[in-house]
């Protein structure tokens, strides 16, 4: 149960009616001085869990966040709500910092955002000592974990907060943690005595879809044109080169897309990120360096053109879609070559054998997700230790794939590998193996006399793409692996069971594409009754102009979800407008009249 004070703050400041699941309990606990470890999916509503206690308690809530580039936006969004917020990080000059420090010391700040490396500086510790800290919030807490996918050394220093300020409550928050990561976070942050709050990780509004990569560009374009025209979205690629290529390709095809990767200079990167946040309906094509902590609520799709390295990473990245709770798509195209590349990268990568082993396990779990014939969501939740029911909103639920007995084709591939093994210093990849099975007399086949192998031409019952699926699934099932030095395909310990006929190999048959089924009813960025659509568009135009004039992202003014509610409820007075979710005291005072005028204009 939330205290009247917390509920009053939720309504007055944030303009929301009720707490989301989990929020009230966490807020009570932390407001009462307790430590907390909070696991909630992206979009679950973590920020309120420390913002409201910070508003309710005396002093300033100090938020540790690695997302320097976003602090300005976070602070702007809070100020738009009438919350006194500031930040300290390396992007500021001395004068700017002094102002914020003075505000903090004068007790004028409700919230102070700090980059973790600030705590390395003794002057920061001294500053915090001289002011009044109401709580420490450690955002993106998984960054403290070396087992996870996003380790930041500066986070290790956060273990000292407790000794230094034993009476200040700490709340660590993350959207991604398996059991192992959670235990590691608790121990590294000295949060073993803290209460753990684990919300459901499910993101029911996200539709998960994974399909084999045939022609990535065309597949992507089809997705965007059929289902997400005019929507904001993120496209993830593994390499800078691929980012550039795909951004250009989309733009040539009439979909405005901006690149984002570490090879761009800092200014271009910041400018592209800022445009993506501020403008409606832009697509950003990025390496995974993009997007952590992006709280743009109306990202309608996240597309992966390469296989992510772990389920945790995948879930974190796809979680950036649909934070506003409206229908969104998480789409991934993956192919044989992805598996080969990632296996090679892991083997050639840094770190000791244990580290490589961990990475390899991460990849196995990701592959298992790709090749599953079960509900994707059930698989994902299971990975995070939670139970789920088949969801009806993922590709395997919408168009269930069939399984087929692939033992014989598997044996054919494996015996070809055995025969090529004698020449393992040659890079005989999947393509060559498939050419042999199909009996193609191409230059390479002739050069190595592979048309004389017993397996030559024994696989004409399947097409090239089907053979690729077979090889991909053998890799996914660990029945085939990649030789680290030359990248050739080689047998594993379990391959012989298949060759001897002691093990059956079940495979997934790709169903017809699911897009066709869902495209029709998902054209509008937010589902609206037809008569509300022009009103929504008018409100959106007003919002765009207002945001531009103020130099803030559009969602800082109002979220899509709020505009949508206004467009359907058509309030005719300030009192009625105040009832709409997301319209708090400050925004009502600031924008209320303009919204009513915009409605009256219609
Ligand atoms: P997270 O940090 O967990 O990803 P946020 O704190 O950014 O999530 O919240 C996600 C979205 O949900 C935001 O748009 C936020 O304003 C909204 N939200 C959070 N709590 C509530 C609530 N109790 N009622 C309505 N909307 C909420
Ligand atoms: Zn499902």
Image (cartoon, rainbow, N blue to C red):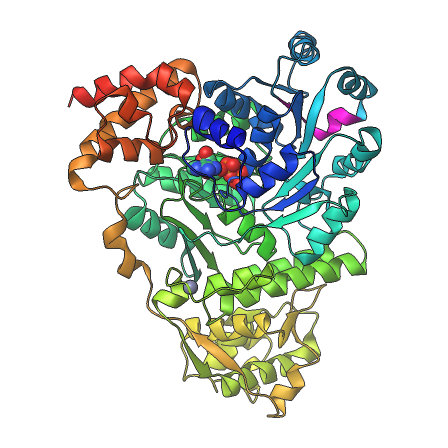
Magenta stretch bounds: 111-119
Residue at the image point whose x is 41% and y is 20% from the top: 585
224 versus 447 height, above or below: above
Looking at the rendering, which quadrant does residue 129 occupy?
Answer: top right
Number of numbered labels in the structure image = 0
Q: Is residue 456 visible to the viewer in this orientation of the structure?
A: no
Residue 323 vs 352, above or below: the answer is above
Residue 174 in view (yes/no)? yes
In reply to whether residue 390 is colored magenta, the answer given is: no
Residue 292: image x %, image y %?
A: 57, 38
Q: Which sits in the foreground, 79 or 134?
A: 134
Q: In this rendering, would 456 be left or right of 250?
A: right
**Side of 158 relative to 468 (left or right):** right
Residue 130 or residue 433, whichever sits in front: 130
Q: Is residue 55 above or below residue 202?
A: above
Query: Which of the two residues, 408 or 367, is positioned nearer the viewer here?
Result: 367
């Amino acid at each position: 149960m939330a205290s009247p004070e917390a509920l009053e703050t939720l309504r007055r400041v944030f303009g929301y009616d009720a707490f989301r699941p989990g929020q009230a309990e966490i807020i009570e606990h932390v407001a009462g001085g307790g430590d907390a470890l909070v696991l909630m999916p992206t979009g679950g509503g973590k920020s309120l869990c420390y913002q409201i206690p910070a508003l309710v308690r005396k002093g300033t809530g100090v938020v540790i966040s690695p997302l320097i580039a976003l602090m300005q936006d976070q602070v702007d969004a809070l100020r738009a709500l009438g919350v006194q917020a500031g930040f300290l990080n390396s992007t500021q000059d001395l004068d700017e910092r002094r102002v914020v420090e003075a505000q903090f010391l004068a007790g004028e700040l409700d919230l102070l955002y700090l980059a973790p490396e600030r705590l390395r500086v003794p002057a920061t510790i001294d500053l915090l000592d001289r002011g009044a800290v109401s709580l420490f919030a450690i955002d993106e807490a998984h960054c403290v974990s070396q087992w996870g996918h996003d380790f930041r050394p500066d986070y290790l220093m956060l273990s000292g907060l407790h000794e230094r300020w034993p009476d200040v409550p700490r709340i660590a928050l993350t959207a991604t943690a398996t059991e192992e990561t959670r235990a590691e976070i608790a121990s590294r942050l000295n949060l073993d005595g803290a209460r753990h709050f684990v919300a459901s990780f499910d993101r029911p509004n996200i539709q998960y879809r994974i399909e084999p990569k045939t022609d990535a560009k065309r597949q992507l374009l089809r997705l965007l044109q059929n289902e997400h025209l005019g929507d904001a979205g993120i496209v993830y690629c593994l390499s800078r080169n691929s980012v550039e290529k795909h951004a250009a390709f989309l733009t040539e095809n009439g979909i405005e897309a901006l690149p984002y990767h570490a090879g761009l200079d800092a200014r271009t990167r910041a400018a592209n990120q800022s445009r993506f946040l501020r403008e409606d309906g832009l697509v950003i094509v990025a390496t995974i360096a993009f997007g952590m902590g992006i709280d743009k609520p109306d990202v309608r799709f996240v597309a992966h053109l390469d296989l992510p390295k772990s389920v945790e990473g995948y879930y974190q990245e796809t979680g950036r879609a649909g934070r506003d709770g409206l229908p969104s798509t998480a789409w991934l195209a993956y192919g044989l070559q992805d598996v080969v590349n990632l296996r090679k990268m892991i083997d050639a990568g840094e770190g000791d054998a244990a580290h490589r082993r961990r990475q390899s396990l991460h990849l196995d779990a990701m592959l298992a997700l790709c090749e599953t014939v079960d509900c994707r969501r059930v698989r994902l939740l299971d990975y995070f230790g939670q139970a789920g029911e088949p969801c009806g909103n993922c590709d395997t639920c919408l168009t269930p794939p069939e399984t087929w007995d692939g033992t014989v084709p598997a044996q054919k591939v494996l015996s070809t590998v055995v025969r090529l093994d004698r020449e393992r210093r040659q890079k005989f990849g999947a393509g060559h193996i498939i050419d042999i099975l199909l009996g193609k007399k191409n230059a390479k086949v002739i050069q190595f006399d592979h048309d004389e192998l017993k397996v030559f031409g024994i696989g004409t019952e399947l097409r090239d793409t089907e053979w690729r699926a077979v090889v991909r699934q053998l890799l996914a099932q660990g029945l085939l692996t990649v030789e680290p030095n030359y990248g050739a395909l080689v047998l594993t310990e379990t391959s012989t069971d298949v060759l001897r006929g002691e093990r059956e190999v079940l495979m997934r048959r790709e169903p017809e594409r699911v897009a066709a089924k869902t495209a029709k009813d998902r054209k509008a960025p937010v589902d609206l009754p037809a008569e509300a659509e022009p009103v929504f568009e008018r409100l959106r135009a007003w919002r765009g102009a207002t945001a531009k004039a103020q130099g803030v992202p559009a969602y800082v003014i109002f979220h899509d979800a709020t505009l949508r509610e206004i467009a359907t409820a058509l309030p005719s007075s300030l009192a009625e407008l105040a009832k709409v979710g997301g319209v708090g005291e400050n925004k009502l005072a600031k924008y209320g009249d303009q919204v009513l005028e915009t409605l009256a204009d219609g």
